[in-house]
Amino acid sequence: MLRYTLRRVLMIVPLLFLVSLGVFALVLLIPGDPAITISGENATEAQIDATRERLGLNDPVLVQYAAWAGNALTGDLGSSLFSNESVSGAIMGRFPVTVAVTIAAMIVALLIAVPAGIIAALRRGHWQDRGATLFASVGISLPNFWVGILLIMAFALAVPIFPAVGYTPITEGVGEWARGLVLPGLTLGMAVAAEITRQLRGSLSDVMQQDFIRTARANGLRGRAVIAKHGLKNAAVPVVTVIGFQIGFLLGGSVIVERVFGLPGLGDLAIRSVLQRDIPMIQGIVVVTALIVMLVNLVVDLSYGWLNPKVRQA
Amino acid sequence: MTAPGIREADTASLDAREAISTPEQSARARFLRRFKRQVPALIALGYLVLVVLSALCAPLLATHDPLQQNLAGVLQPPGGGHVLGTDDLGRDVFSRALYAGRISLVAAAQAVAVAVLLGVIPGLVAGYAGRRVDAVIMRVTDALMSFPPLILAIAFVGVLGPSLTNAMFVIGVIFAPRFVRLVRGTVLSIREESFIEASRSIGTPTPRVIWRHVLPNALSPLIVQISLTAAMAMLAEASLSFLGLGVQPPDASWGSMIERGFRYTAAAPWLTIFPGLLIALTVLAFNLLGDGLRDSLGREIRRGS
C-alpha cells in the first residue's frame, strides 16, 4: 500500500509541470503585445514600458516561466493588476464560499443519488428503475443556471422560503448560512446527482449478479447486509471515480451558481478578473482549481487501494 | 478504464438467438434493426431534425424581425401578437429563439469539430505508436483533464477576448481528450487482431492500415461520443454565453437570451423559461440519441464504451 501510495503521489509531479506550463502559456496567447493589452488602450508609452518591466516581459520566455513557477511553488502567485492585492490572498478570501457551495452540492447529490441508484439497481426493469434512469437523463441535460433561476422563481419569489441572492458568512449564524446554501446546492447538485445515480445503478446491478452475492445469500445473510457489505463495497470503485470526476465540474459549475445567486466566491472572482483581463489573477485561479482537481483525483485513486486490495499489489 | 472495441471474448458471447436468426445480416442491418427499437432515441432524432430545420428556415418561420425593437411594447407576456411574448427591448422572443437556435447549434458543431480534429489523430498515434509516444500523449491529455473545463474555458476566453468562436474553440480543445482516449482505446484493442496483422504482413503501409482497418472500427464509438459531446458543448456554450463570455449582442444564443431575461426574472419569467426549455430539450435529445446509438451498436463495441 505504501509503495502504491508513493508511486501515485509521484505521478503528480509531471502533471503539475504540464499544468503549470499550460497556465503560464496563457500570457503568450494574448493577441498582440500583452503589455499594451494589460495596460489598457489609452496607456502612454511609459506606462506600457512599466507594465512590461513589472511582468518581466523583457526577459526570455524560459526565464519568465522559471520566475513565475518558482514563485508559484512558494505560494506567491503574483498580485492583481488592478487592486495590487496578492493573488493568493484574494483566492484564499473567496475560497470558503466556493468550498461551501461545492460541499452543499455534493451533499444534495449524494442524498438523491445513493437511494435512487440503489433502488434502481435492485428493481431493474421496474418503474422505479425507469424513473431513476429518466431522472438521470434529464438531470445531466438541464443547464444549471436555468435550474437556479427556476428555483429562485419558485422558492425565493413565489414562495419566499430561501434567499434569492447573497451569502451569509458562517460567523453570522450557522442557520442563515445553511439556508443561503440550499438553493445553490440544489442547483449545482442536480447534475452530479444524475451522474452518480447512473453510475451507481450500473455498477451495483452488475455486482448483484455476481456469484459471490448468491453465495452470501445462500449462506443465509440477510438481504440488507448482502447489499451493504458485498454489493455496495464492490460497486463503489466506479462510483468513487465518478464522484472524483465531478469535482472539476463542481468547481466550474460554482462559477455559474455564484453568478446566479450573487455569491462572493472564486467563480465571481474569476469572472471579474476575466472582464478586467487581470491575467495574474486568472492564472492563479486556474492553477489553484487544477491543483484541487489533481489532489481529489489522488485521494480517489488511493481510495481504490482501500476498496480493492488487488489495486495495491498491481 | 476498459478499452472500447472488439475483443474475442465478447464476440464469442454474442447473443445466440441473435446469431442464429440473422446469420448473414450485415452489421449495419443489425444496427438499424436494433436502433428502430430505441423509442426515446428515435423521438430525440425526430426532435433534433425539427430543431435543425427550424433553425435553417428561421427567416421563413419568424413572425417578426428578431432585431427589431419596439420600446412601446416591452416585456409583453406570451399570447396576442407575440407567441412567446417580447423582451426588454420589445423584440419578439419566438423569432429571436429561432435565430438563436442557429447560433447555438453552429456553436456546438464547431466545438465538436475541433474536439474530433484534435482528438482523433493523437488518439491513433498514441494507440499505434510505441510506448514512449503514447506515454507523452496520455500525460498531456491527463494534464488537460485536470483543469475544470468551465474555468479553463473562462480563462482562455478572458485572455483571447470574449467571442463565440474563441469560446467554442476552447470548448473543443477541452473535449478533445475524450476523443484521444476513445480512439486510443479502440486502436489498442484491435491492433493485435489477426486481420490487422494479416494486412501488415503483406506489406500494407501503416497509414493505409490505419485508414482502412483501424479507423472504420473506431467509427461507431466515435459517433456515439460525438452525440454526447454535442450535448456537453451545447451546455458549455449556453453557460459561457450566460456569463457574457460567448456570443456578443446583438447576436443571441439561447444561453445569452437567458442571461438577458435573468434581469427580469420577477416581471417576465417567460424570457428565461422558453430559451432554457429549448436548451434542456436539445441537450436531452443529443444525450438520448447518443445512448440509443450506443445501445444499438454491436454488443462487442457497446460493452466497452
Image (cartoon, coloured by chain):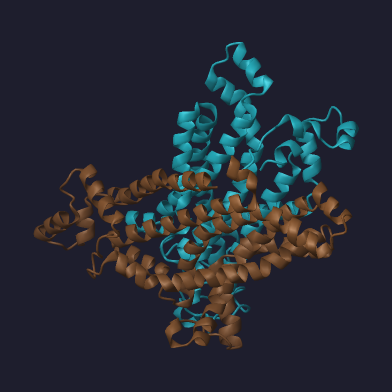
Residue at the extreme front: A2
User: In front: A286, or B73?
Assistant: A286
Q: Which chain is cyan?
A: B
Indicate the position of residue B18 as horizontal and vertical percent values: 86, 36
> Which image quadrant for residue A60?
top left
Query: Compared with residue A234, is residue A191 higher up or lower down, i.e. above or below?
Result: below
Q: Number of marks in the image?
A: 0
Residue at the extreme left: A46
Q: Quadrant of the C terminus of chain A?
A: top right
Indicate the position of residue B22 as horizontal and vertical percent values: 87, 32
Indicate the position of residue A294 as horizontal and vertical percent values: 46, 53
> Which image quadrant for residue B167?
bottom left
Q: Is residue B248 left or right of residue A311?
A: left
User: In front: B21, or A117?
Assistant: A117
**Residue drawn at the location 35% of the way across and 67% of the way down:** A91
Residue A274 seen anywhere in this rendered image of the structure? yes
| Chain A image colour | brown
User: In front: A77, or B197?
Assistant: A77
Indicate the position of residue A296 as horizontal and vertical percent values: 50, 57
Query: Compared with residue B147, is residue B67 higher up or lower down, i.e. above or below?
Result: below
Q: Is residue B176 left or right of residue A210?
A: left
Residue at the extreme top: B202
Residue B271 seen anywhere in this rendered image of the structure? no
